[in-house]
Amino acid sequence: MVVPVVIVLVLFVALLMAYPWIILTAGTLAYLVSLPFGYLSYRGYQERAREAKAETATSSPAAPTPPAQSPTAATAVHPLPDQGRPSRLN
């Protein structure tokens, strides 16, 4: 996998040196074309997180309480998950 990546990188640098404006314009256009796809992907993540949150809310009406721990327990090593964060970040 490394050899094809190196070959593509060398070709890209060679083309960039030979045709800088064409390559930079093509790269800019490719970036601009990819923006709507990134937005749609982000919206898909939001929708799946919203569905997962709704599913967990309907499946368990009350969140289970964590077991009681002594003040010296290693809570800093294993903190409880933050309920306010989206599920894809946990």
Image (tube, grey):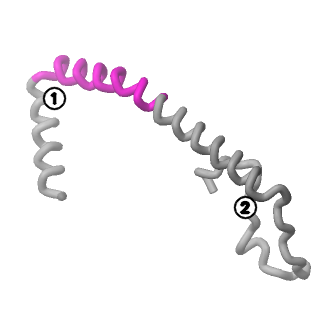
Work out which residue is located at the far front of the displayed protein and give it: 59
Q: Secondary structure at mark 1?
A: helix
Residue at left offset 48%, top offset 28%: 39
> Is 57 situated left or right of 86 in this image?
right
Q: Is residue 78 left or right of residue 4?
A: right
Indicate the position of residue 23 as horizontal and vertical percent values: 19, 24
User: Label 2: how many residues lie within 10 Å, few (<14), some (14-19) or many (20+)?
Assistant: few
Expressed as whole percent of the image width and height from the top left, the position of residue 81 reads: 72, 61
Q: Residue at x 34, y 22 (%)?
A: 33
N-terminal-most mark, 2 or 1 = 1
Q: Position of residue 35 (x, y in %)?
A: 41, 25
The numbered mark at residue 45 is none
Give residue 16's mark: 1
Rendering quarter of residue 69: bottom right
Please tell me which residue is depicted at 79% across the width and 74% down the height of the picture: 75
Q: Quadrant of the C terminus?
A: bottom right
Judging by the rendered image, the residue that carries numbered circle 2 is 81
Magenta region includes residue 40: no
In depth, the one of 23 and 66 nearer the eye is: 66
In the image, taking residue 89 as reference, residue 28 lies left or right, namely left
The amino acid at mark 2 is Pro
The local secondary structure at tag 2 comes to loop
At label 1, counting other C-alpha atoms closer than 10 Å, the crowd grade (few under 14, some 14-19, many 20 or more) is: some
Q: Which residue sits at x=29%, y=25%?
A: 30
The vertical placement of 76 against 19, above or below, is below
* Main secondary structure type of the part rendered in magenta: helix
Label 2 vs label 1, nearer the camera: 2
Q: Is 27 one of the magenta-colored residues?
A: yes
Find the magenta span and give its range.
19-39
Nearer the observer, 11 or 55: 55
Amino acid beneath label 1: Leu
Mark 2 → mark 1, Cα distance in angstroms: 47 Å
